[in-house]
């Protein structure tokens, strides 16, 4: 069961985040090849691939149909989001300060950001 679930999630990832979803257009490839075979009986698969993939994007009568073929368009424009820690969370942490025996801080804390600055971004509180 784990292997099946792992395979399922791998396929979902590959189809969503790579160009593997283009393989779903194989039916359009076969259908378009059949159309060309009806028009030209001497059309081979190699000639069909050469015309549609190695001759550039020729704007002919069936250009819209050509663009439905797999790997003809680039519609998988994913990006990796960056993860940042919001400043409010950093300020919400209570820092530990070093103090001497008299209870005075060992260094000047006036340069530290104020924890009160993030308080204005809090949701209203019910009384």
Image (cartoon, rainbow, N blue to C red):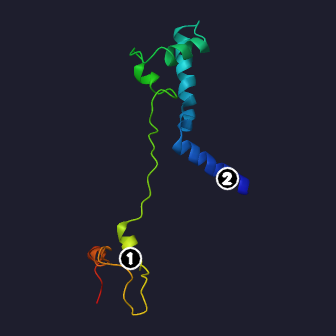
Are there few (<14), some (14-19), or many (20+) residues within 10 Å of tag 1? few
Residue situated in front as seen by the camera: 90 or 16: 90
- Residue 97: image x %, image y %? 42, 82
- Residue 55: image x %, image y %? 48, 14
Label 2 SS: helix
Can you say whether 3 is above or below 115 in the image? Answer: above
Query: Which quadrant: the N terminus?
Result: bottom right
Q: Is residue 90 left or right of residue 70?
A: left
- Tell me which residue sits at (52%, 45%) in the image: 16
Is the residue under label 2 in contact with that under label 1 (CB below 8 Å)? no
Q: Earlier in the sequence, mark 1 or mark 2?
A: 2
Residue most extreme to the top? 42
- Residue 46: image x %, image y %? 60, 13
Numbered tag placed on residue 40 in the rendering:
none
Q: Which residue carries the number 2 mark?
A: 6
Are there few (<14), some (14-19), or many (20+) residues within 10 Å of tag 2? few
Q: Which residue carries the number 1 mark?
A: 92
- The part of the image, by quadrant, that contains residue 93 is bottom left
Q: Mark 1 or mark 2: which is in front?
A: 1
Label 1 SS: helix
Query: Which quadrant: the C terminus?
Result: bottom left
- Tell me which residue sits at (39%, 91%) in the image: 103
Can you say whether 39 is above or below 62 in the image? Answer: above
Can you say whether 119 is above or below 11 in the image? Answer: below
Can you say whether 79 is above or below 28 in the image? Answer: below
Q: Is residue 69 left or right of residue 3?
A: left
- Residue 9: image x %, image y %? 62, 51
Residue situated in front as seen by the camera: 18 or 51: 18
């Amino acid at each position: 069961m784990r292997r099946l679930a792992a395979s399922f999630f791998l396929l979902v990832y590959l189809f969503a985040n790579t160009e593997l979803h283009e393989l779903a257009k194989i039916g359009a490839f076969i259908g378009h090849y059949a159309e060309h075979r009806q028009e030209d009986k001497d059309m081979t698969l190699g000639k069909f691939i050469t015309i549609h993939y190695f001759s550039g994007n020729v704007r002919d009568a069936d250009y819209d149909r050509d663009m439905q073929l797999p790997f003809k368009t680039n519609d998988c424009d994913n990006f990796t989001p960056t993860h940042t820690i919001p400043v409010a969370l950093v300020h919400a942490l209570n820092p530990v300060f070093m103090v001497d025996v008299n209870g005075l801080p060992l260094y000047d804390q006036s340069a530290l950001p104020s924890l009160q600055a993030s308080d204005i971004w809090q949701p209203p509180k019910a009384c």
